[in-house]
Amino acid sequence: MESLGLIFCLAYFAYFPIAGISSILLARRINDFGHQGVNPLIRVCWILFSLFMMFCGVGLVCISILVVLFNQQSSLGALFLILPSLILYFVSIYQEYQCFRAASTLNQGDDYHLPEPLQMKIQSIRILGWILLGLPLLVFLPIFVSFLPLLLACILLSSIFNIFSLNNRANESELLWLLTVCVEKNIPLGPEVDAYAETRPRKYRAKLELLSSRLYSGVSLSTALSETPGLVPQSAIVSIRIGEESNALSLALRDAAVRTSKFLKNESGDSSGTYLVVYVTVVGTILFTIAGFIMFWIIPKFKKIFLDFDTALPPMTLSVINLSEFIIANFFLFLPIFSVPFTLLILIHIGNYYGWSNLRVPFFTTWFPRLNTPDCLRQIAQSISAQQQPQLALNSASRYHLWADVRMRSEFVQTSVIQGENLWTSLQNAKFISSSEAALCDTAERVGNLPEVLRALAFSIEQRRTRKLKVLADLLKPVIVCSLGVVVGLFVIALFVPMIQLIFDLS
């Protein structure tokens, strides 16, 4: 069993990094070469390597299941314990399957540019590759932060990252207000952006200078901002594009600046999602530390005491002892679980720092198609307020939005409307709005107050989303604390009940 554990640990610390690095390299090669220009021999090597990695992942899963089936404890309970690790291995197998499919598409077709579905797949491969690469590196963090000073340092670092995230949102709001004032007062944008850049830190100043150079070259504001990512939210770029097309740029900029300021105020006052992840990470680390210390240090000594006195142990105590022996003897099966909380925490901080709308996260946005619904409704309201067709907003979203699924669904709605289908029915079919929201928009269009209703509906959706997140945070915190109490309580009852019985017998 020791040799099996050593082999399994080596496989774990080698398999995930290799899978991650190979996925990242494959995604980069496909982006660089497209369908053409890839050596056929390299293509065959990528396909064979992906199949080999899939075989290794299946082998690790089979070894895990065999270890559980041939242990002397309850197979069902042990299998339930390693289920999170098995899920991570299945994710790696799925990743290699995606790499196999992507490599198989190389040198297929005459067009160099990649189609939208393949671009989404490549982005998913790249993101999952970085996650797989970081899993083994983060496995030691729960052990390190188990000490109180390091645990406090982890909490402090999370607070610092939140401050940096808020600072980025403040920079976005400040720049949008500067552009709004310049457009409203007919002030040239280039010199004002240069003057503003002189007051900013060096890294941010370089982005502003790049923006001003593009403005000096004569490109539109929306194009300059889209070519200089990280300065304003992506939804603001789409709104600015609509304002340029409808000759209402000042109104579009002011609306984007107001919404960014409100979002900054809400984020400053409440960050339930981030605090919830930090809370889960800290409490989970404490739980792993306490349970691991009891299993490794306390339970063997209690077992020796009970055996020396030939004490009859209750079923609960036997179950706890057997469970402890299984986990300690097969600790390598649980290695992936230790890195999951910190992986989620790092991903949350990355999303907050750069802004979720400024990141390409195709698999996440595909799972939640209504994430962009409020922005979509506001952009349609902006087009209608400027006496333009709603297709203007859809066209801008299909061209400038960073989320590939939003671009595809916007183009689908635009095509459906051109073919004569009702706009709200098309939005419902594309999963932007629900059936009740489509009926409300249709009624508002007949009444004549559609822009106001669309903005109110967008605000209502955001409020409901915020309330659900708060409710989830309020529910999970006591559940986590109660789970911690139940685990500790089970250990205490299982170990001290026979101890008390032993004391009574001796007295």
Image (tube, helix red, strand yellow):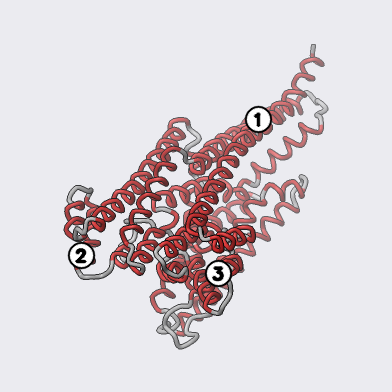
Residue type (three-letter) at the residue carrying disc 3 = Leu
Is 396 drawn above or below residue 3 in the view shown? below
Question: Residue 485: which numbered mark, if any?
Answer: 1
Amino acid of disc 1: Gly
Q: Identify the residue shown where x is 19% and y is 58%.
A: 187
Neighbor class of circle 1 (other Cα within 10 Å; few <14, some 14-19, many 20+) is few
Q: Earlier in the sequence, mark 1 or mark 2?
A: 2
> Along the horizontal axis of the image, is 212 left or right of 483?
left
Q: Is residue 178 left or right of residue 133?
A: left
Three-letter code, disc 2: Ser
Quadrant of the rendering where the C terminus is positioned = top right
Measuring from the top left, give residue 390's x and y in whole percent. Answer: 47, 68
Q: Secondary structure at mark 2?
A: helix
Q: Which mark is residue 361?
A: none
Which mark is in front, 3 or 1? 3
**Res 345 seen here:** yes
Residue 63 picture quarter: bottom right
The residue carrying mark 3 is 423
Element on which disc 3 rests: helix
Q: Position of residue 486 (x, y in %)?
A: 69, 32
382 relative position to 366: left or right: left
Mark positioned earlier in the residue sequence (3 or 2)? 2
Q: Residue placed farthest to the front in the image?
A: 447
Q: Residue at x 53, y 53 (%)?
A: 457
Residue 381 at x, y percent in the picture: 46, 60
| Between marks 1 and 2 in the image, the one whose residue lies nearer the viewer | 2
Q: Which residue is mark 2?
A: 213
Residue neighbourhood size for the residue with mark 3, other residues' Cα within 10 Å, grouped as few (<14), some (14–19), many (≥20): some
397 in relation to 13, above or below: below
Q: Are marks 3 and 2 in contact (CB under 8 Å)?
A: no
Q: How many neighbours does mark 2 have within 10 angstroms: few (below 14), some (14-19), or many (20 or more)? A: some
Relative vertical location of residue 350 with respect to residue 500 in this rendering, above or below? below
